[in-house]
Image (cartoon, grey):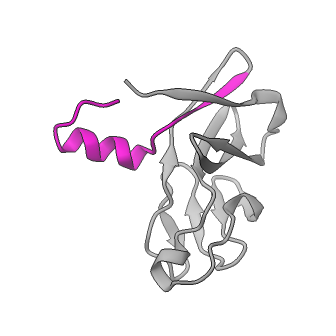
Amino acid sequence: MTEFRVAARRNEIAGGAMKIVEVAAREIVIVNIGGGRYYALANACTCVASIRAPAGRLGEGKLTGDTLVCPVHHTVFSVATGAPLSGFNEMPVRTFEVLAQDGLLAVATRSDTERRFRNDCGFKAA
């Protein structure tokens, strides 16, 4: 079973806005694209791994609809999947499941990628 931790209140993140939080010792950016749709991504751009450059903090980037632009490398990422949509970076950003309930936003302590890997390898989801 996936563990969730309360990370913010829903009213702290207006539609079209985002907030940087810490969950399970990870810096994560929670994005509200409006219509009650919230997403969470690792706050570090993956450009650092692909070109060995300083990581851009995605929570300081530009949010346009359901895409987020790295403020350093200008790679455009899908907030829903973490996939790079344009730019030179080919590595996706880790995403995290978000639950919105009772005015609170809770974020999974493991990324979607980590959970899929554990399940694909026959491990019991934790």
Q: Is residue 60 left or right of residue 6?
A: right
Q: Quadrant of the C terminus?
A: top left
Q: Position of residue 47 (x, y in %)?
A: 54, 76
Residue 24 coordinates in the image, percent (x, y): 56, 40
Q: Is residue 43 above or below residue 98?
A: below
Q: Is residue 124 magenta?
A: yes
Taking the magenta stretch, the answer to whether it contains residue 60 is: no
Q: Residue at x 35, y 41 (%)?
A: 115
Towards the viewer: 112 or 81: 112
Q: Position of residue 27 (x, y in %)?
A: 64, 51
82, 54: nearer the viewer = 54
**Which residue lies at the image location 69% right of the left edge and 65% below the top edge?**
57
Outermost residue on the top side: it is 102
Q: Is residue 21 left or right of residue 120?
A: right
Above or below 86: residue 63: above
Q: Residue at x 72, y 57 (%)?
A: 59
Quarter of the image where the N terminus is located: top left
Residue stretch rendered in magenta on the structure: 104-126
Q: Nearer the viewer, residue 68 or 20?
A: 20
Closest to the observer, 70 or 85: 70
User: In the image, is residue 50 above or below residue 11?
Assistant: below
